[in-house]
Image: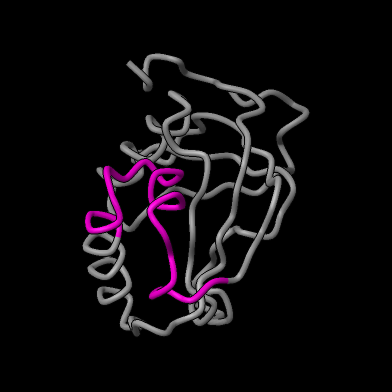
Amino acid sequence: MLPKKYRDVPAFSFGDTPEMADSGLADVIARRQTATCGSLEVLERPDRFMPFVRALEIVLDGRGEPGCVIRTSQVVIRQFDVIDGEFAREEACIDLAQWREVHEAYFRRLAVFSPSMDLVCQYFDVVDVFDQEVAQ
């Protein structure tokens, strides 16, 4: 059950599949993932919502259940083709090649991919965890 103090906090899930949502949540809870990114084009489209500008956000699992709360510490705009290995590791990727492969596929599914596309890069800290079993 969601604590009352978080009832008005916006929620989101990682990726575009339940498996991606579960994997992202597990990485965040385990502190393997401390950053994420989204397309500026998707952010500006009214039929899509990406959360990258709010102070607190609830991260949902693949069933839409709350898993944890994060607090944004920094937001930076970068082009896809200048993302470096350090950011890839912050997003829980093994290396930059894996990050590029996963993110290019994701943004192609959203029909917004371009090597020079602007990304909103969000850094965050975990504030509260609701279900620690997800991280195991």
Image vertical order of residue 89 relative to residue 131, above or below: below
Picture coordinates of residue 34 (x, y %)?
A: 52, 39
| Quarter of the figure with residue 75 | bottom right
* Quadrant of the frame with the N terminus: top right
Picture coordinates of residue 22 (x, y %)?
A: 33, 37
Q: How is the image coloured?
A: one colour
Q: Residue at x 59, y 55 (%)?
A: 122
Q: Residue at x 42, y 31 (%)?
A: 32
User: Which stretch is magenta?
Assistant: 78-99
Q: Quick check: 97 left or right of 116?
A: left
Picture coordinates of residue 21 (x, y %)?
A: 35, 44
Q: Residue at x 28, y 53 (%)?
A: 17
Q: Residue at x 42, y 35 (%)?
A: 25
Q: Is residue 53 magenta?
A: no
Q: In front here: 22 or 106?
A: 106
How many circles with numbers are drawn on the protein? 0
| Quarter of the figure with residue 56 | top right
* Quadrant of the frame with the C terminus: top left
Image vertical order of residue 91 relative to residue 97, above or below: above
Q: Quick check: 75 left or right of 116?
A: right
| Quarter of the figure with residue 115 | bottom left
Image vertical order of residue 50 relative to residue 71, above or below: below
Picture coordinates of residue 111 (x, y %)?
A: 31, 83
